[in-house]
Image (cartoon, rainbow, N blue to C red):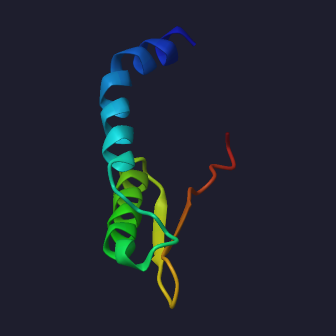
Amino acid sequence: MKNVFEFLHLSRPRHLEDLLAFLRIPSISAQAAYRPDIERAADFLCDELKDLGLTVEKITGEGNPLVYAQTELDPSR
């Protein structure tokens, strides 16, 4: 457990910067003028989730995009 806390402590600046980069995207879904930024926010999330090893799908349609991600469970764990 000590290794987990050490990892979290050491990687905090990077994770905080990633979060702040995401929050800087003005993705206000109630305003059509922000549609490009909404797409950019969805792409950002897709990239971050892929980096974590998840299978990611961005679903697009008439409305705002939906980001769907999942991980395969290891039955031996």
Name the quadrant containing residue 41: bottom left
Q: Position of residue 48 (x, y in %)?
A: 37, 51
Q: Position of residue 59 (x, y in %)?
A: 50, 79
Q: Quadrant of the C terminus?
A: top right
User: Residue at the spot x=63%, y=52% of the render?
Assistant: 73
User: Residue at the spot x=35%, y=65% of the render?
Assistant: 43
Number of on-image labels: 0
Residue extending furthest toward the bottom: 62
As displayed, is residue 48 above or below residue 29?
Answer: above
Q: Quadrant of the N terminus?
A: top right
Q: Nearer the viewer, residue 39 or 6?
A: 39
Name the quadrant containing residue 46: bottom left
Q: Position of residue 71 (x, y in %)?
A: 56, 56
Name the quadrant containing residue 25: bottom left
Residue extending furthest toward the top: 2
As displayed, is residue 24 above or below residue 12?
Answer: below
Q: Position of residue 33 (x, y in %)?
A: 36, 76
Q: Nearer the viewer, residue 61 or 1?
A: 61
User: Residue at the spot x=43%, y=12% of the render?
Assistant: 6
